[in-house]
Amino acid sequence: MKLTGREKTELFLEGIVTVILLLMLNLSIIILINQSIHTNPGLRDGIFIIKKSILIGPDHYHLWSWENIFITLMLVFDAAVVYWRLIRRYHQMQLRHIISELHYIANGHLDHRIGFKLKGNTQSVVESINALVDSVIKSMNEERAIESSKDELITNVSHDLRTPLTSILGYLGLIQDKQYKSQEDLLKFTQIAYLKAKQMKSLVDNLFEYTKVKQTGTPLSINRIDLSQMMEQLVASFELEAGKNGLQISAQGTDQPLYIEADAEKLGRVFNNLISNAIKYGKGGKHIYLTCQVGQPNEAVVHVANDGPEIPKQSLNQIFERFYRVEGSRNKDTGGSGLGLAIAQSIVDLHGGYIAVTSENQLTTFAVHLPFKHGDRLSRPDDLK
Ligand code: ADP
């Protein structure tokens, strides 16, 4: 820390004043002692006896010049007092510097940090202040990011609700104004309005689900689940829908049951979303393959794969973002909200796992990695980050 000219003068004057005060004190002590010795013969004799009886060193010197020793001791004491007063004043100055730096930061210069180095405990105070400012800035930025992500969520939801709502109002308006030519037209308009209303409901449901799983501390109802058996059940429940879309769905589990600790309902939601996507976006393909196996020693891996159009490379690391839809899916009438994968990822994350996606050679594969034990957390490999 650099002292200003004024502070240096202040220190200098403090030293001078202390020295003068101490010299006056020393002088008065010496005068007092001398006076007491001269006016008190008993004391003088006592001092003489003490001087005679004290012998110093192997050669037994007498302590005749006690005044010199007394003066030396007083000078040492004086030096200590001067040092103590100067150090105390210097610490006050350091504190003043720290406070003025704090005022500067508090006045909005949030990227400023206390730059000077001090000795001892004061340096740890400076470091703590800098660390405190860093963490305040970090949480302010996080707060801002959350705020803008909420705004973005509201904008997206309003947009996605307004589109079907506009068409519902349009078709209901046509019906109300009797602007239809035949009974078939009337039925068609009602059907479109109904479909759009269903789309709105699905968006609201997804949104509700998304905010629910995104909340911190979402409770999980953990049970022991056999993933092999779950795959079989999923095949049975999607067989018909896949068939209608010209797709064949099959599962390949392990010979033995593959148990993990998980929330069956929430995990079901993950696989439902992945399989529904495989049906929706796998048009032109023929198969949906479900497999489950042991991955790393502490994890189970479920693959949901479908042949059909690939996801463009540049979209692969964005498809888990909420409301993200690959260009083309937006225009097609697949009725998606862009929340399905975000929900799936949040649920898998709640279980301590992660999802990875690959899309090449006409095969799109979602790999869901889950720890066997509830409470364990798998770390996503670096090449997937
Ligand atoms: P959506 O409600 O649009 O289905 P998702 O979050 O489930 O939202 O999916 C995001 C986007 O990822 C989809 O719009 C789609 O473009 C793409 N996608 C997801 N699964 C597949 C898949 N199996 N094959 C091809 N594209 C997919």
Image (cartoon, rainbow, N blue to C red):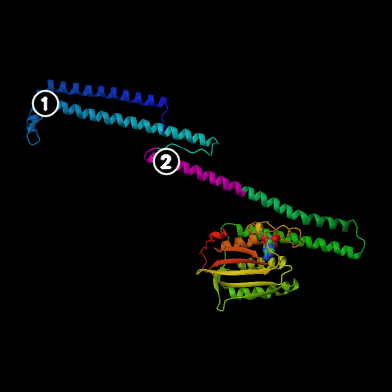
Residue drawn at point x = 10 percent, y = 25 percent:
44
Residue 199 drawn above or below residue 29: below
Residue drawn at point x = 78 percent, y = 60 percent:
196
SS under mark 2: helix
Percent x, y for residue 201? 73, 61
Percent x, y for residue 379? 52, 61
Residue 358 drawn above or below residue 234: above
The disc label shown at residue 43, or none: 1
SS under mark 1: helix
Label 2: which residue?
A: 125
Lateral position of residue 97 relative to residue 366, left or right:
left
Residue 168 lies in quadrant: bottom right
Q: Nearer the viewer, residue 363 or 348?
A: 363
Residue situated furthest front in the rendering: 361
Q: Which residues are magenta?
A: 118-146
Are the residues at dot 2 and dot 1 in contact (C-beta closer than 8 Å)? no
**Whereabouts is ligand 1, in terms of quadrant?**
bottom right
Percent x, y for residue 146? 61, 49
Q: Residues within 10 Å of mark 1 (few under 14, many from 20)?
A: few
Residue 297 drawn above or below residue 343: below
**Residue type at the position of mark 2:** Val
Residue drawn at point x = 54 percent, y = 35 percent:
107
Residue situated furthest bottom in the rendering: 255
Q: Mark 1 or mark 2, which is nearer the start of the sequence? A: 1
Q: Residues within 10 Å of mark 2 (few under 14, many from 20)?
A: some
Residue 41 drawn above or below residue 186: above
Q: Nearer the viewer, residue 34 or 142?
A: 142
Magenta span includes 130: yes
Position of the N terminus by quadrant: top left
Lateral position of residue 21 relative to residue 254, left or right:
left
**Residue type at the position of mark 1:** Leu
Disc 2/disc 1 C-alpha distance (Å): 54 Å
